[in-house]
Image (tube, rainbow, N blue to C red):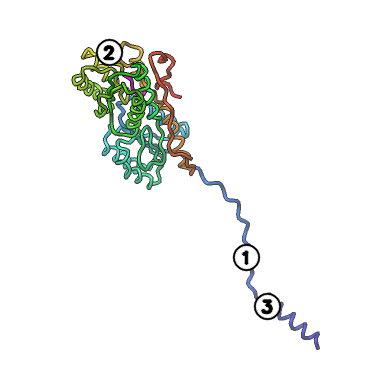
Amino acid sequence: MIQPILKALAAGALAMLCALPAVAQTPAQPASAPAQQRQLKKVGVTLGSLGNPYFVALARGAEAAARQVNPQAKVTVLSADYDLNKQFTHIDSFIVAKVDLILINAADARAIEPAVRKARKAGIVVVAVDVAAAGADATVQTDNTQAGELACGFIAEQLKGRGNVIIQNGPPVSAVLDRVKGCKTVLARHPQIRILSDDQDAKGSREGGLNVMQLYLTRFPKVDAVFTINDPQAVGADLAARQLNRRSILIASVDGAPDIEAALKADTLVQASASQDPWAIARTAVQLGVDMMNGQRPANPTVLLPSTLVTRANVGQYKGWATPR
């Protein structure tokens, strides 16, 4: 009796198994491939003024660095002429052109933020060069506080800690503010150094340096030294002083530009300049930009490159801006 029942149960189980739908075999998934690296194809560069040799060198450095990454990279360089509205237009045009990276020397570090954020929202990496720009992914610049300290430390040393000094100011961007801050920090250590004025904007240009210096020399009968925030202003200040036959004034500045190399080797009032390296700034900015395009964020988004003091004593060994490096 038991045996027929067992046979019946076995037959039923077999029928149920046959009725079940076949289970599809899932093929093994291949190991995920590494993420495709974004290639640098287009770079947009907007700079303060291409009338300034410093920005010309920075532009050449950016082009060289981009083409080292990709020989076919297209680099568009535009001059904002320190005009914020122009710079907004530049960034809009870069967004339309779908560039991968923007290098920006901001005409106004704070006011440029909406344009910077618009570019970043469009998937473009933005790196500020020479001066800060609110909202940028990173900033690469000279240690401008140190540069101001070097130039004004030289002034204090040459004046033996006493005398009348003018700080010839410039556009209110972070680089200029930091240079003036560094200068004042050093001069404050010398109670017998008097700062006659520090609030005149010479516009970062030779013409501005000339015009402001003429006003200063008309106003102040005794000036022992002048700190200018960049070399074009220093050249203009030197010209004004020599025109007015005020040849006992010492001038020191920041940049290490070709014009200052020539001035340091000639009979001028310019005695020193704390140098910048626009090639290194551009190269570092492009490298950072490419890394960030591919998800590698820097540990510190602000990179400060050191300055060195160029004087009449060492100008012969100074490499300058002309040579790529």
Please count the marks in the image: 3
User: Residue 238 or 180: which is nearer the viewer?
Assistant: 180
Q: What residue type is labelled 2?
A: Ser
What label does residue 16 carry, if any? 3
Q: Return the disc, 1 or 3, that comes first in the chain's sequence.
A: 3
Closer to the chain start, of discs 3 and 2, is: 3
Q: Determine the image quadrant of residue 320.
A: top left
Q: In this view, does 92 lie to the left or right of 310?
A: left
Q: What secondary structure characterizes most of the magenta part?
A: strand
Please, what secondary structure does the residue beneath circle 3 have? helix
Q: In this view, does 59 lie to the left or right of 31?
A: left
Mark closer to the observer (1, 2): 2
For the residue pair 103 and 22, the one nearer the viewer reads as 103
Checking the image for residue 270, the label placed there is none
- Mark toward the start of the polypeptide (1 vs 2): 1
The residue type indicated by label 1 comes to Ala
Any part of residue 12 in sight: yes
Q: Quadrant of the N terminus?
A: bottom right
Location of residue 180 in the rendering, given as x and y in whole percent from the top left corner: 32, 29
3D distance between C-alphas at marks 3 and 2: 111 Å
* Residue wearing tag 1: 24
**Going by the image, does 190 lie left or right of 13?**
left
Label number found at residue 248: 2
Magenta segment boundaries in residue numbering:
251-255
Q: Are marks 3 and 2 in contact (CB under 8 Å)?
A: no
Q: In the picture, residue 29 is in which quadrant?
A: bottom right
CA gap between label 1 and label 2 equals 94 Å
Distance (Cα) linking label 1 and label 3? 18 Å
- On the image, the x and y values in percent for residue 109 come to 32, 38
> Which residue sits at x=36%, y=34%?
131
Crowd around label 1: few <14 · some 14–19 · many ≥20 (10 Å): few
Residue 268, percent from left and from top: 30, 13
